[in-house]
């Protein structure tokens, strides 16, 4: 058995989780080839999950709140040499797991990879303007791309459906143990922070393995009405701004700041003048998040 499917979950919607499990049940890859582990990350009540159809399925409790902690627990529990992280609102195409194993065999130099993500809205009437879709984890993948360069963004896999070799998740677990602040790069209950999946991919690059994306891997991401509210989307934008500063600090030890040179200031002002209302609100939210991260990091540096 090479493959372990890990679903970290915190207070999941029962109907969404049920659909996620049904999509896994419909996989063309037989259940004898993979195990299924649901990580209950400090939910108010145990998730309702009918797992009788799978001979190697179980629910494991992780009481420490945070997606990073849930993922690490999943890695520790996994028997497979390869883990695929599936969110509790992801619907994998029927051939997804078989395609994952085909990539694992064909590209032994890759440590992490993922694929395309299509949005499925609970209510099409609530669909937000396209500019906000970046905060709903949508991704188009036209062709296979891979690289071992962390700065090559197009080949950097995302968390939904992230495939991770054991060497990589062992290396990543070591990084988090040596610097627990890395755990702040992921969702923590209702606190929106991002970057843990990127951190996992970069951990693979750090041990000489590449990262990639493949169009043969595809899933649908279920989007509830509440996530389409502009206030929630701007909260996601703020979390993204916060995460970018924190991740940069963890990677290179410096606190990035806004551009203060004349060219940078003028360029930013021109972009704002050309932008629409939504773009300006998004930019302002990202600045708030970045400023919050800088303030926290500078306070930590000062207190040392």
Image (cartoon, rainbow, N blue to C red):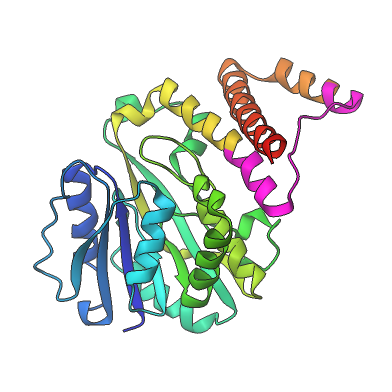
Residue that appears at 20% across and 41% down: 44
Image quadrant of residue 14? top left
Residue 140 position in % (x across, y down) = 51, 51
Which image quarter holds the C terminus?
Answer: top right
Q: Is residue 273 rendered to the left or right of residue 259?
A: left
Residue 85 position in % (x across, y down) = 38, 61
Image quadrant of residue 75? bottom left
Per the rendered image, the range of residues in magenta is 243-265
Residue that appears at 11% across and 69% down: 53
- Residue 163 or residue 128, whichever sits in front: 163
- Determine if the magenta segment contains residue 251: yes
Residue that appears at 40% across and 55% down: 69
Tally of marks? 0
Residue 251 position in % (x across, y down) = 68, 53
The answer to whether one can see residue 183 in this image is yes
Image quadrant of residue 224? top left
Which image quarter holds the N terminus?
Answer: bottom left
The answer to whether one can see residue 92 in this image is no
Residue that appears at 70% across and 39% down: 301
Q: Main secondary structure of the magenta part?
A: helix
Considering every residue shown, the one lying at the far front of the view is 304
- Residue 94 or residue 83, whichever sits in front: 83
In this view, 244 is above or below 77: above
- Determine if the magenta segment contains residue 66: no
In this view, 76 is above or below 189: below
């Amino acid at each position: 058995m090479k493959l372990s499917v890990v679903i970290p979950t915190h207070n999941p919607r029962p109907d969404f989780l049920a659909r996620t499990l049904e999509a896994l049940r419909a996989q063309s890859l037989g259940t004898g080839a993979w195990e299924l582990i649901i990580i209950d990350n400090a939910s108010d009540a145990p998730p309702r999950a009918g797992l009788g159809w799978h001979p190697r399925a179980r629910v494991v409790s992780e009481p420490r709140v945070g997606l990073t902690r849930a993922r690490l627990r999943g890695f520790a529990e996994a028997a497979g040499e390869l883990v695929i992280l599936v969110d509790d609102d992801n619907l994998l195409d029927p051939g997804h797991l078989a395609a994952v194993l085909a990539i694992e065999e064909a590209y032994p130099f890759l440590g992490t990879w993922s694929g395309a993500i299509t949005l499925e809205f609970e209510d099409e009437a609530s669909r937000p303007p396209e500019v906000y879709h970046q905060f709903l984890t949508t991704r188009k993948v036209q062709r296979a791309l891979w690289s071992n360069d962390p700065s090559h963004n197009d080949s950097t896999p995302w968390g939904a459906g992230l495939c991770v070799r054991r060497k990589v998740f062992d290396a990543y677990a070591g990084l988090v143990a040596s610097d627990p602040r890395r755990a702040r790069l992921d969702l923590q209950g209702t606190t929106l922070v991002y970057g843990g999946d990127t951190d996992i991919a970069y951990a693979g690059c750090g041990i000489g393995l590449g990262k990639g994306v493949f169009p043969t891997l595809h899933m649908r991401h279920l989007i509830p009405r509440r996530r389409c509210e502009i206030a929630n989307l701007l909260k996601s934008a703020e979390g993204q701004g916060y995460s970018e500063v924190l991740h940069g600090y963890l990677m290179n030890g410096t606190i990035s700041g806004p551009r203060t040179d004349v060219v940078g200031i003028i360029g930013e002002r021109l972009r704002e003048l050309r932008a629409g209302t939504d773009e300006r609100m998004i930019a302002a939210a990202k600045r708030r998040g970045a400023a919050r991260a800088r303030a926290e990091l500078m306070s930590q540096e000062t207190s040392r």
